[in-house]
Amino acid sequence: MKNPVQYLLFRAKATPNFIAIQTIDRSYTFIELALIVKMCAGKLRSLGIRPKQLVINSFLDSFFDLILTLSVFYEACISCSNHGYSPIDQDLECDWILTDNPARKSEHQKNQIFIDESWINDAIQQNKINNPNFYDSQSICRLVLTSGTTGKSKAAAFSYDVLDARVKQAFGYWMTPGRELNLMTIPSVGGIISSLSTLFSGCPIYIAGPYNKVQLIAKFNINSLIGSPIQLRDLLDTSNQLNIALDSIEVVRVAGGALSPALLEKIRKQLGAKVLNIYGSTEVGGVTMSELTHDQAIQSAAGYPLPLAEVQIVNDRYEILPPGKEGLIRVRSDAMAHSYYKNLAATEKFFKNGWFYSGDQGFLNEAGCLVLSGRDSELINRGGSKIDPALIDQFLLDLPGIEDAAVFGLSHNGEIEDIGAALVVSTNFDLKTLRAELWKKFGVSNSPAIFFTVAQIPRNPMGKVMRAKMAAELTEFYKLQQNSKS
């Protein structure tokens, strides 16, 4: 049976009364979940949804997204989840949109279906249960949108075989299956793969709303967390505000960015947990892993290549470089995607001869550990000097008075970039002290010269800074401000 719902249908037979989904106040067994998915799929089929059509889920509610993703798989469609508050990418030319977003309900959109509790209850009342449709091995079954931090998001195309391999690959770095909360949502690659691998393992998928993650961890003694640095920082801050200890956590897996040394120590002190660093990408999946130490956080060590991933460092002629020599990182894996959906130009740029080139720079040390030195598309070129904004981000986020921060290249004088910093600050923030701290750490020429106080840093749901979007908006604001002075 070539369909991702096989994981659920197997568990519905083998362990029907085990918990499949657990929210803060409600649970569903595997047999209950399977029945809901079958009946929702039956209603979708009656409305005209057919195999191989592209169906985009645009949900605010993670529970709805999971249920309808599985239902769309049941019908052997091409499934794609976008974040419910993001615009639908018209380039994808989807056949159907499923949404619970009231703002979208009134939009003039062909073949849009509004999903809420009443829709699901009606599907259950109709009780239309059909046999699942199947995919071919190479049929596209899932599109996963890339982060879009350096420009427009692309849709990585997963065939059935690739998605199946990715689910099984996840067990290589899933250290404490049983009670894990993934802070990433279904639209992200981490969210969908984690959900499917959890179903495969027969463990509960824990779903928490934006304001009750801490309560859910405490109530169900969650022992494993996965999230990006900003998601983990926000969770720890909420735990402190609510005065709820998270002492059941044993392992924290960090993905989607590097931890600063200060945040690493905060996690260890507040949770007493082991911390694992996972480096990877939407296109390839997990690439490296290692237990994170203070020294590794300082050195931007990504970890050691996973058994199913091959990592090489090459120069611009694609020649393999020796250990310690910095160059382009390329990766290949049985679980990697091989193209972007209907985007030949991007496919040819990033996928070459069976390898994926992410644009990240780094080197392999003598022990075989991958050390990152920056993302090529994000490096700031200041008079020929290349500066990694992520390193300055980390430093700023650890300073008192700064609630959030992101650094970017601000072009306003030919090709020479200034370094800009967007800051969300508290009332006791002092810019003069900040400048002195930055100059001491990075030197005057490599420190931000222009500062913007903003209400919010634009981040995607994984917590990654939308650097291109922020740079464009603040550069335009800066130019208008300068023109008004002249």
Image (cartoon, rainbow, N blue to C red):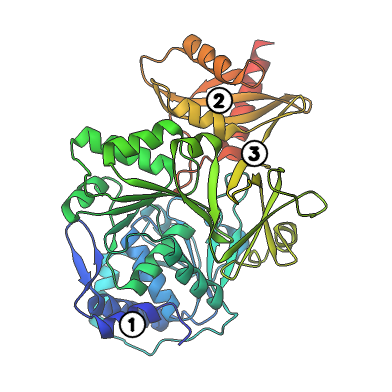
Residue 378 is labelled as 3
56 left or right, relative to 238: right
Tags 3 and 2 in contact by the CB under 8 Å rule? no
In the structure shown, which secondary structural element does the residue marked by tag 1 occupy?
Answer: helix
Q: Amino acid at mark 3?
A: Glu
Distance Cα–Cα, label 1 vs label 2? 50 Å
Distance Cα–Cα, label 3 vs label 1? 43 Å
Q: Amino acid at mark 1?
A: Leu
Report which residue position mark 1 lands on.
9
* Circle nearer the N terminus (1, 2): 1
Tags 1 and 2 in contact by the CB under 8 Å rule? no
Give the camera-side residue of 279 and 274.
274
Residue 285, horizontal then vertical, whole percent? 53, 61
378 left or right, relative to 235: right
Q: Amino acid at mark 2?
A: Ala
Residue at the spot x=59%, y=21% of the render? 442
In the structure shown, which secondary structural element does the residue marked by tag 3 occupy?
Answer: loop
55 left or right, relative to 333: left
Residue 403, horizontal then vertical, whole percent? 39, 27
* Circle nearer the N terminus (3, 1): 1
Instruction: Give the quarter of the figure containing the N terminus.
Output: bottom left
Residue at the spot x=39%, y=73% of the render? 70
Give the camera-side residue of 319 and 237.
319
Q: Residues within 10 Å of mark 3 (few under 14, many from 20)?
A: many
